[in-house]
Amino acid sequence: MFSMPVLSFSLNGLRDILKLPPPDYLKIDVDGAEAEIIANCSFDNVKEILVEVGSDESQQTVRKILSKEFTLVDTDELIGVRDRGEEYPRNEFWMRK
């Protein structure tokens, strides 16, 4: 077993550091941390979000948060996932209401 240090920033913090404008579109693929990231992110100017959710619990949390400002437009399972007997991960496409 080993540990590896990882540098991490909130999306808003990284925007401030790099002096970037707010994004219009987001793709979130973070292998299980999507609910935490979405819960701590501001979506002021975001028009559309594509998020890969990795579990039922994560999906419920993501949907609860995003449904306040966005409408779920489409959901698809990733290619090959069902062949392995798994239900997730799944992509969800959201548009601002």
Image: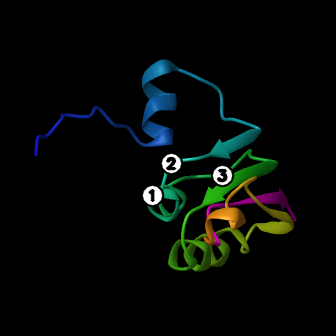
Q: CA distance from mark 2 to mark 3?
A: 17 Å
Pointer 2 or 3: first along the chain: 2
Pointer 1 or 3: first along the chain: 1
Q: Are marks 2 and 3 in contact (CB under 8 Å)?
A: no
Mark 2 vs mark 3, foreground winner is 2
Measured along the vertical axis of the image, is residue 64 above or below residue 18?
A: below
Residue, disc 2: 30
Q: CA distance from mark 1 to mark 3?
A: 17 Å
Name which quarter of the figure residue 71 lies in: bottom right
Residue occupying the point 72% across, 74% down: 68
Q: Are marks 1 and 3 in contact (CB under 8 Å)?
A: no
Whether residue 33 is in magenta: the answer is: no
Q: 30 or 82: which is nearer to us? A: 82
- Amino acid at the residue labelled 3: Phe
Measured along the vertical axis of the image, is residue 64 above or below residue 46?
A: below
In the image, residue 57 lies at what x, y percent?
51, 79
Q: Residues within 10 Å of mark 1 (few under 14, many from 20)?
A: few
Residue, disc 1: 33
Q: Main secondary structure of the magenta part?
A: strand
The range drawn in magenta is: 87-97
| Label 2: which secondary element | loop
Q: Are marks 2 and 1 in contact (CB under 8 Å)?
A: yes
Side of 31 relative to 42 (left or right): left
- Amino acid at the residue labelled 2: Val
Q: 20 or 81: which is nearer to us? A: 81
Mark 1 vs mark 3, foreground winner is 1
Quarter of the image with the C terminus in it = bottom right
